Image (cartoon, rainbow, N blue to C red):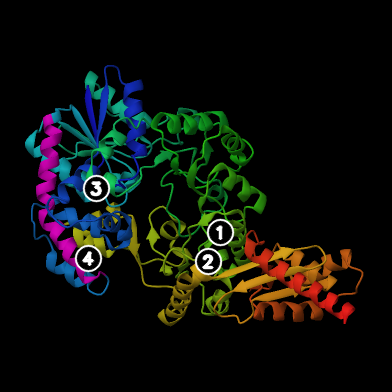
Amino acid sequence: MRVLLVNMPWAPIDLPSLALGILRRSVDEHVPDGEADVLHANIEYVDWITKHTEFTLEDYSYYSLGSYFLGCGDWVFSSALYDDPQWRVPEFTAAMSGRVRRDQMEMTRALHEIAPDFVRYIAERIVELAPDVVGFTSTFQQNTAALAAAKYVKRLAPHIVTAMGGANCDGKQGEAVHRNFPFVDHVLRGEGEVSFPALLRALDAGEPLSGVPGLCWRDADGTSVVNAMSTGPLPPASILPPDYAGYFERLASSHARNWVEPKLVVEGARGCWWGEKHHCTFCGLNGSFMQFRSKSPDVFYDEVVELARRHRVLDMYVVDNILDMGYVKTVLPRIIDSGYDLRMHIEIKSNMRQGQLQTLADAGLIFVQPGIESLNSRVLTLMDKGVTGGQNVRMLRDAATVGLSVAWNYLHGFPGEDAADYDDVVAQLPALEHLNPPVGASSRIAIERFSPYFNDPALGFSELRPAEPYRLTYDLPEAEMFDLAYVFDVPPRGIGEDVVERLNEGIARWKRNYAGSRLTHWDLEDRIVLVSRRRAFDWTYLELTDPFELGLFRLLDQPHTVKAAVRKLHGGHPVNVDEDTVRQVLARWRALGVVFEDSGQFVQIAPPARNEEFLRIDFMRHTSARDAELAATTA
């Protein structure tokens, strides 16, 4: 049986598809006489579109991820899905006015008009390859492109079996895809390593399809039949390593190779160990299976090293929703000792300590996404994040200390929040301009399928409607669109736009000033020296020498309340320290931008100096003092 797996736009071009890499290996290992190949239609699109328009990497990135919540990428291919180059152009243009730049709108309409030509081209390529089964993966803004390609393949070659899977086909979404698009013969919901080979074996043997878990299929009269999904997630020992054969060769021959450096995609774990206990209220990741499970340290280490060795690529994207903390003491030390100079991106929890972050940095996991989301403890409690604002600021400081780059977003719009949860944070943003800012302006939360906000109206969102881009893209009844959608529109909750505007102005200043801002400290036992270059503060040099202040600053390496600080200082300081004294010092330090305050907790925000700037200043200061002393003694 010949199987062709297709990765349509707008999948990232600098990453091979993990899903198709795993399915390719699962076909080879679990389907007798099965042979699977991957068609990198996303890369084919780059070569095709650059011959027809002035298309750039920035354009591809915009439709791949940048415009996700606007739905521009899916709308581009809706013209092919509905065989109409002018499909809903006036409606889309009117809806996106003010939200999409004029040049982006012109490009979007141009791509939309010629999308049917590309889909026809890629469908002809698929038919020429003569597969028995063609499988499309659909994640993020791949849905309309995948559906349109399946439609055109069926039109050209009705005998080819079409199948779809991926994140856009999980749960109810997969059922809706199968019900509404009859040119898709089969939809696989959930993890495909077991169900896809089972489908292929059943098709090859002419056996009933009723035993394939999670499968949507059609009976003799064309009615959509939905098999029950697996009751439990796939055990980690059954998660196969991906087979990326062909991706790097195809990219090397493409115009896209001039745009990107390819990276490997690796997977150590699925699910979320925090989400099992406290599902973040806005998070829809992990879909049907939240249960955390991870590969054995030996297996994961061997996969990472083997992929790097085989493909001679050191940049890696770890897709785990959260780091298995056991890997910090098992896998990462072995990577450090391996001699491979890896550079990896991974998602972590923001309460990791500096020593753990140092291990990440030493192992090459230098790009981290810690899910910070807010710097206010009360809002973080509404999210059920399990961290405080002070801990998130400490994360930013410690990441700067060990040399990690932090990617994070500031979210708002939570039921129960108010302006006071943001005003004090905004007032303190100038003090943080030496630390990694959010990647963009703050975002009002989107309600995602599978999230607690979606599943439980009592949490504050009872009026759910498929997000506007779905209504601009699909010709479906509202109820069907509801089942198809992953993102939903709701009446806004939480803070008003005036507060959002102040927050975004503060973030914009932070981003502008970050490159030229510095705040560091050097602990010399008998004194602590701080050096600052931040636009909102007129001091550049501050020295702490009082034993009480030295003890307090060191204590604030971790967030503390005034009461806790006094208690601990009493235990290790000979001078009687009271709360008023501590408050006065902390008020002065906050005014100087030395500490961050949130919900009664304070944390110092100056990473230790690890550059020559302090050494020059300290050397010059003490040299001048010695010269003055010599002058006084010889006068």
Amino acid type indicated by mark 4: Gln
User: What distance separates the C-alpha of mark 3 from that of mark 1?
Assistant: 33 Å
Q: Earlier in the sequence, mark 3 or mark 2?
A: 3
Q: Which residue is mark 4?
A: 104
Q: Which residue is mark 3?
A: 9
Labels 4 & 2 near each other (Cβ < 8 A): no
Dot 2 or dot 1, earlier in sequence: 2
Left or right: residue 176 versus residue 345 is: left
Of discs 4 and 2, which sits in the foreground?
A: 4
Mark 3 to mark 2 CA distance (whole Å): 33 Å
Side (left or right) of 247 relative to 221: right
| Part of the protein shown in magenta | 100-128
Q: Is residue 228 among the parts visible in the rendering? A: no
Q: CA distance from mark 4 to mark 3?
A: 17 Å
Are discs 2 and 1 less than 8 Å apart at CB? yes
Instruction: Give whichever of 595, 19 is nearer the camera.
Output: 595
Q: Earlier in the sequence, mark 4 or mark 3?
A: 3
Q: Amino acid at mark 1?
A: Lys
Please give the residue where the numbered disc 2 appears in the rendered image.
374
User: Going from the N terminus, do you reach mark 3 or mark 1 first?
Assistant: 3
> SS for tag 4?
helix
Q: Secondary structure at mark 2?
A: loop
* Lower sequence index among marks 1 and 4: 4
The residue that label 1 is drawn on is 385
Please tell me whether mark 1 sits on a helix, a strand or a loop.
Answer: loop
Spot occupied by residue 454 in the image (x, y as percentages of width and height): 41, 58
